[in-house]
Image (cartoon, helix red, strand yellow):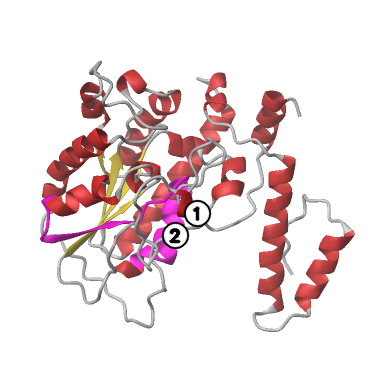
Amino acid sequence: MPMIIDSIQLKFPIIFCLLACMACGGRKPAEQINELAQKIGRTSMVEDYPKVPQEEILLDMPASQVYFQLQQRYTNHLNALKAATTRDEVRLLVLVMTPEVGKYATQANTYGIPYILQICTNAKVDVQNITPAIAEWSSSDDGINTPMYGNWSKQGTSFAAGQIANILAEYSGYRSPTTYGSAQRPATFGDATKDNTGIDNVNDLPHGGDKTPYRLHLSKQGLRMDNELSFPKTRQRIVFMGDSRIFNPFLDDEYTITYRLQARFPGIEIVNAGNISCCMDDYATLYEEKLRYAEPDVLVVCTNGGDILDEYFTHRNRFSRNKKCYKPTEAEVNFYKKTYKK
């Protein structure tokens, strides 16, 4: 039976749990043991490597072995998403957008955005980059365009929605022929819940759940919407995936980018499947496991340079939607020990 915790030192209580799991009914013992082993491994990894680096990874640039590995992971996950959408005849658009450009530029975006544009070109994936327009717009000194915790202001979502509206016109009328029966559809299409929405302890952002300082509606289907998707669909369905830059924390529903786009395009169904702290790894698995069954015609993946850094193993072990145990490469461990003097 394959085990995935070979690099983790087991103590007696953990072994006891594994043996108890084997005796449980329900799912196959192998599945139960593998799931528990993943949980144990992930917990151990978080305890052993509690720090989640961000731009520290870029201090070794331009020849960082770790950053190169993260770029490769990003590439692999994007290619997996492309393969899945191609199979389903869903139009895939990678949209590069973030308020952290121009006068608010971060190193993550300075290094990451050019790479994302290049890999999309190499992979023949449609890509649109609205960050030059955002940088010019945010150059004002009046202060109203300042990002909030690295995310959009009300004025920012209005500007971004205007830029995106021009892009969506290129996909007008496209419909995917792929459909699914009701028995195939999962209960949810997105991962947003009151328990995980807006929670980001690493960056010390405000928490979600009932403590959110903004009006937040989540559909029963796990989407940031105040209505449920129905089938068969009667309009073109454009689904947005991404992290906080499309989920839009700290803003009331009516100020989100997708809400503004829905108001502009009443003849199109705009769907917000974004969530906090996600990256290309999560986008690929979310589409494969859930979102494809929402029957999108166009899938817009909102990304930025930070998504590359979020492929680092400690970020994945804390925030990955599939709850896997991510083992570090030798380069990642060496970087961690050097950075945090472990």
Give residue 32's quadrant in the image.
bottom right
Label 2 close to label 1 by CB (< 8 Å) = yes
Badge 1 is on which residue?
A: 196
The residue lying toward the viewer, choosing from 130 and 156, is 156
Badge 2 is on which residue?
A: 191
Q: Is residue 33 above or below residue 52?
A: below
Give residue 39's quadrant in the image.
bottom right
Give residue 213's quadrant in the image.
top left
The C terminus lies in which quarter of the figure? top right
Q: In the structure shown, which secondary structural element does the residue marked by tag 2 occupy?
A: loop
Residue type marked 2: Asp
Q: Residue at x 65, y 33 (%)?
A: 331
Q: Along the polypeptide, which appears first: circle 2 or circle 1?
A: 2
Q: Which residues are magenta?
A: 264-292
Answer few, some or many: residues within 10 Å of disc 1's Cα (few below 14, many 20 plus, some between 14 and 19).
Answer: some
Where residue 245 appears, as percent x and y from the top left, is 35, 41
Q: Is residue 21 above or below residue 246?
A: below
Answer few, some or many: residues within 10 Å of disc 2's Cα (few below 14, many 20 plus, some between 14 and 19).
Answer: some
Where residue 301 appears, as percent x and y from the top left, is 32, 48
Q: Residue at x 42, y 55 (%)?
A: 284
Q: Residue at x 24, y 26 (%)?
A: 132
Q: Residue at x 44, y 23 (%)?
A: 107
CA distance for labels 2 and 1: 8 Å
The mark lying in front, picked from 2 and 1, is 1
Residue type marked 1: Asn
The residue lying toward the viewer, choosing from 7 and 143, is 143
Q: Is residue 39 above or below residue 243?
A: below
The residue lying toward the viewer, choosing from 34 and 329, is 34
